[in-house]
């Protein structure tokens, strides 16, 4: 049984991945993390909200303490990263949010994963 952390899980691609994964691996646990910005909608995940193997967390991938607590608290062994700011017009008028999520957020996920799987905080032995 795998334990996944899926970022951007309430967006179009993330939610479709979560449904696909659950349909093909119903025994796996999925922790869905999403900040619910303009592209995310928790209603995209409504059919899974009552499943024992599913947990939705509203939060930001830039929050290192949150990401580390999810990795450790749920014994996550697989990280699937879809969280991103992707609206081109918004990236021109307000690029800071894009830099924060797409660059800083991805770096935060990598740092947390490295600490958890490679630096001894987690079980280790994972692929990185």
Image: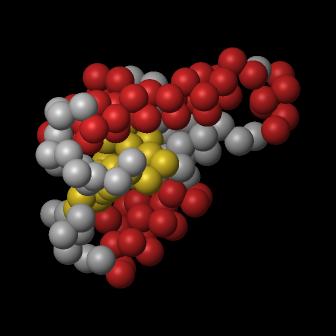
Whether 54 is drawn above or below 82: the answer is below
Q: Position of residue 1 (x, y in %)?
A: 18, 69
Here the colouring is: secondary structure
Quarter assignment of residue 113: top left
Whether 7 is drawn above or below 47: the answer is above
Q: Position of residue 49 (x, y in %)?
A: 29, 59
Residue drawn at (60%, 28%), measured in percent from left and top? 103
Task: Answer yes or no: is residue 67 visible.
Answer: no
56 to the left or right of 99: left
Whether 66 is drawn above or below 12: the answer is above
127 to the left or right of 69: right
110 to the left or right of 30: right
Residue drawn at (35%, 81%), measured in percent from left and top? 24
Residue drawn at (61%, 33%), measured in percent from left and top? 102
Viewer-nearest residue: 98 or 42 = 98
Query: How many circles with numbers are drawn on the protein?
Result: 0
Task: Answer yes or no: is residue 48 visible.
Answer: yes
21 to the left or right of 83: left
Whether 45 is drawn above or below 128: the answer is below
Q: Position of residue 21 (x, y in %)?
A: 39, 72
Query: Which residue is farthest bottom?
Result: 24
Residue drawn at (48%, 48%), measured in percent from left and top? 81
């Amino acid at each position: 049984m795998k334990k996944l952390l899926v970022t951007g899980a309430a967006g179009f691609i993330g939610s479709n991945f979560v449904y696909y994964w659950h349909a093909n691996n119903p025994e796996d646990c999925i922790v869905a993390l999403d900040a619910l910005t303009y592209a995310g909608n928790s209603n995209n995940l409504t059919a899974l909200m009552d499943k024992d193997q599913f947990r939705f967390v509203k939060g930001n991938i830039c929050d290192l303490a949150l990401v580390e607590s999810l990795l450790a608290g749920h014994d996550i062994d697989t990280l699937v990263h879809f969280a991103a700011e992707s609206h081109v017009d918004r990236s021109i008028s307000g690029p800071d949010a894009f830099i924060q999520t797409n660059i800083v957020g991805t770096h935060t996920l990598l740092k947390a994963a490295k600490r958890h799987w490679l630096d001894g905080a987690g079980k280790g032995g994972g692929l990185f």
